[in-house]
Amino acid sequence: MGDEPVNVKEYQELAKQVLPKMYYDYFAGGSEDQHTLRENVDAFQRIIIRPRILVDVSKIDMSTTILGYKTSAPIMIAPTAMHKLAHPEGEILTAKAAAACNVIMGLSFMSTCTIEEVASSCNAVRFFQLYVYKRREIAALMVKRAETNGFKAILLTVDTPKLGRREADIKNKMIAPQLKNFEGLISTEVDDNKGSNLEASASRNFDPSVSWKDIAWLKSITKLPIMIKGVLTREDAIKALEVGVEGIIVSNHGARQLDYVPATISVLEEVVDAVQGRVPVLFDGGIRQGTDVFKALALGADAVMVGRPIVYGLAAKGEYGVRRVIKMLKDELELTMALSGCPTLNDITRNHVRTRVDNHHCRL
Ligand code: GLV
């Protein structure tokens, strides 16, 4: 392999070489049998593109808006935790790369740089990911800080009443760093040397009682639009619309929570059909190349979010690596659009892909 990776998979290889095993396993791993982890990627390979010919593709326009905010491509940085485990400067570099590439950055609730540090280091449009802790005032405080620091939306992650069982982290006795955002608010002591201390701190802090009625509470403490992240069924998409969220994110948390849930790409269409364009639908899980982005757009996503590839770029080459990963995905999407006869995002339709459902009338 040459020094300059040519695709996300090569960035993953580089990240594996440079990261301590404990941290690589944390980022790359899924839960339990890791069935869904493999499926998130493999399910894309079962979707085939139906290109159209003799279309003028001399100009390709990938730009769009998400919640009204401009982005150079329908590709957003997914919130992923603890970037200082990937690079000593952490989320500040990720945010700078987002700004340089003109894409929107999702900042994790469990970031290692503070909300304020990230906000002051770049002018990228930023959304803030939220978990609700048992001590509700912490969520309220974080939302306030995000608002004050110019974040534009809340990405409420709802698939984590408890942390999924990540066996690699348990074996490695994964040590998560203290999170500066919570200094003085929660105990960040390492109190469990038997397994993953991330798991121990999650079970101390995450509130498993959070339910649909709490969306009203969240709406009462913020004016920011709320996107609900972790929807995998038509039933929950409909409920999310009923409680009045501004967006839906089809996500299985990068296959880190419940194992044996479907690959996100295989349930995207079900959710899109239920939502019927009433709010934007974002998508994450398994995006590794431009054709994957194209397939998700064809199945109805308004934009995709990319998680692990960003972390791999950061680990391998810092801010430059994150920029390269975003640029590669954008270039690959641009090429896919050209080769399939779609000069604009609106030209990408359901007819541009064939899934197993189309072939066999059975679910993927
Ligand atoms: C945190 O959200 C994680 O998935 O580790």
Image: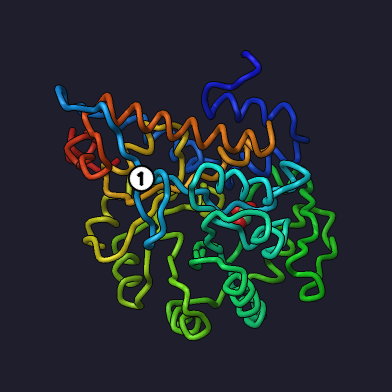
Q: Nearer the viewer, residue 77 or 217?
A: 77
Visible in this render: residue 75? yes
Could you tell whether 147 is left or right of 314 in the image? left
Could you tell whether 47 is left or right of 18 in the image? left
Residue 142 sits in which quadrant?
A: bottom right
The residue that mark 1 highlights is: 63
Could you tell whether 108 is left or right of 258 in the image? right
Quick check: is the Cβ at mark 1 less than 8 Å away from ligand 1? Answer: no
Q: Secondary structure at mark 1?
A: loop
Mark 1, Cα crowd under 10 Å, few <14 / some 14-19 / many 20+, is: some
- Give ligand 1's quarter of the image: bottom right
**Looking at the image, what colour scheme do you see?**
rainbow
Residue 186, percent from left and from top? 77, 73
Q: Quadrant of the C terminus?
A: top left
Which residue is located at x 45 percent, y 78 percent?
A: 215
Q: Quadrant of the N terminus?
A: top right
Which residue is located at x 47 percent, y 52 percent?
A: 252
Visible in this render: residue 164? no
Question: How many numbered discs sit on the rendered protein?
Answer: 1
Residue 7, percent from left and from top? 52, 25
Residue 211, percent from left and from top? 47, 77
* The residue positioned farthest toward the top in the image shown: 2
Q: What is the three-letter code of the residue carrying label 1?
A: Ser
**38, above or below 14, in the image:** below
* The residue positioned farthest toward the left in the image shown: 54
Which residue is located at x 34 percent, y 50 percent?
A: 64
Q: Nearer the viewer, residue 36 or 146?
A: 146
Which residue is located at x 43 percent, y 77 percent?
A: 212
Residue 261, percent from left and from top? 43, 50
